[in-house]
Image: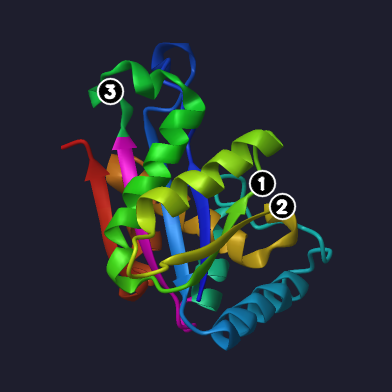
């Protein structure tokens, strides 16, 4: 089982000084490695079809509507499913959320908690960010809070550069879509979400 994690927005709480109002984390799951390979290859083929060079990155926020629509229609036949969480930062309180790394770890924990019944011995791939120390902390944190004595839901956590990983780019798209859709003021957000709606298990808006 392969799990890909990415985010949309930023974990900063100073919205009046430029931080995003919402922060979203997506969790994209492939139960079968063959399905993951097939989807990965389709994304590479799409890049060729639209005339991009091989190391061009699909990135939801930066891409045009035409590219977004083409990307989503290319991936929607493949066997993956996703969870997500969208955090309304205006409703947060407590000192712990003021630390960006603690906030990010907690957001990841929430989305993994929602996906527990689907996870089994998963290899988790997260977009590379932060220091080596933070990446090690995140690895330990997720295993501590998600694994239990009876079941190993997470086998290992790996960090990779999203530019070199098509399926992290898929996770970026999912995070961007659910973030925009929840805000309900972004052009075509719900249209994008409908294309992959059959892949959605649960998207939590937190806190209520």
* Relative side of 28 to 132, left or right: left
Q: Closer to the observer: label 3 or label 2?
A: 2
Q: Earlier in the sequence, mark 1 or mark 2?
A: 1
In magenta, the rendered stretch is 76-87
In contact (CB < 8 Å): disc 3 and disc 1: no
Q: Residue furthest left?
A: 208
The residue that mark 1 highlights is: 128
How many numbered marks have been drawn onto this rendered protein structure? 3
Pinpoint residue 23: horizontal percent, then vertical percent: 40, 37
Question: In percent of the image, x 55 and y 49: which residue is there?
Answer: 139
Quarter of the rendering containing residue 156: bottom right
The residue that mark 2 highlights is: 161
Q: CA distance from mark 1 to mark 2?
A: 5 Å
Residue 43 in magenta stretch? no
Q: Circle 2 — which element?
A: loop
Q: Coloured how?
A: rainbow
Question: In percent of the image, x 39 and y 66: which residue is there?
Answer: 82
Question: In percent of the image, x 52 and y 51: which residue is there?
Answer: 6
């Amino acid at each position: 089982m392969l799990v890909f994690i990415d985010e949309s927005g930023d974990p900063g709480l100073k919205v009046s000084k430029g931080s995003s109002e919402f922060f979203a984390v997506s969790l994209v799951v492939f139960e079968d490695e063959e399905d993951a390979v097939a989807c990965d290859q389709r994304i590479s083929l799409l890049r060729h079809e639209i005339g991009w060079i091989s190391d061009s990155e699909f990135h939801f926020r930066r891409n045009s509507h035409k590219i977004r629509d083409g990307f989503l229609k290319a991936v929607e036949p493949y066997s993956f499913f996703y969870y997500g969480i969208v955090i309304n930062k205006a409703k947060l309180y407590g000192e712990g959320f003021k630390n960006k790394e603690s906030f990010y770890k907690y957001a990841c924990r929430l989305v993994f908690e929602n996906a527990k019944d689907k996870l089994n011995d998963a290899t988790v791939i997260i977009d590379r960010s932060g220091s080596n120390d933070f990446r090690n902390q995140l690895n330990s944190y997720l295993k501590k809070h998600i694994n239990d004595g009876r079941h190993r839901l997470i086998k290992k956590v790996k960090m990779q550069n999203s530019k070199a990983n098509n399926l992290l780019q898929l996770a970026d798209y999912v995070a961007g879509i659910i973030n925009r859709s929840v805000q309900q003021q972004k052009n075509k957000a719900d249209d994008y979400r409908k294309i992959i709606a059959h892949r959605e298990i649960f998207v939590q808006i937190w806190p209520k």
